[in-house]
Amino acid sequence: MDTIHKIGRRKTAVARIYLSEGKGNITINDRAFDNYFTTGTLQYKVKQPLMLTENEKSFDISVSVFGGGVTGQAEAIRLAISRALCEIDAENRSVLKPEGLLTRDPRMVERKKFGQKKARKKFQFSKR
């Protein structure tokens, strides 16, 4: 099997993963996986597609991620891993799709408008 390269995005985070056969090592921006994502929730999000397809110990994943915050980065990595697993075996798609792991989350931050305090919040109105 050759190395598979996939991209995942979420909010402003962009994750590029390189998935190859191995023992289950995950490195993110040249750092250890549990060193980069310290909370259990974020670690679970990244490993979720591997756990659902029972491939936790069969692939080494090298990740380059930038932009956004930690949650956006974790979910971008999750999407990229899900896409790579579908390319390896088409049967993985039937497992990942019902969980919503193959859907790019389109929600983005709404821009601030002029004459307003934030995107939707207005300046305080004074009648007199």
Image: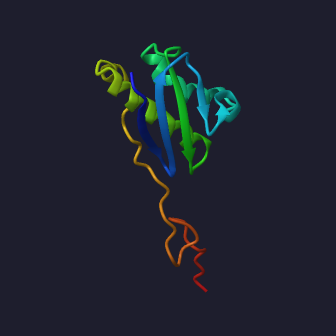
Q: Quadrant of residue 95?
A: top left
**Which of the pair 36/2 is nearer the observer?**
2
Say whether residue 104 is left or right of residue 110: left
Where is 128 relative to 121, above or below?
A: below
The residue shown at (36%, 37%) is: 103
Give the quarter of the figure containing the C terminus.
bottom right
**Residue 100 visible in rendering:** no
Q: Quadrant of residue 34?
A: top right
In the picture as drawn, the residue positioned furthest to the bottom comes out as 128
> Residue 81, percent across and down?
45, 30
Give the quarter of the figure containing the N terminus.
top left
Where is 77 relative to 89, above or below?
A: below
Say whether residue 7 is left or right of residue 43: left
**Which of the pair 35/119 is nearer the observer?**
35
**Residue 116 visible in rendering:** yes
Total tally of numbered discs in the picture: 0
Say whether residue 49 is left or right of residue 37: left
The residue shown at (58%, 27%) is: 26
**Which of the pair 1/19 is nearer the observer?**
1
> Residue 65, percent across and down?
55, 43
> Residue 70, percent across and down?
61, 42
Q: Quadrant of residue 86?
A: top left
Where is 56 relative to 116, above or below?
A: above
Colour convention: rainbow
Say whether residue 31 is left or right of residue 1: right
The residue shown at (49%, 65%) is: 111
> Residue 75, percent across and down?
51, 37
The residue shown at (55%, 71%) is: 122
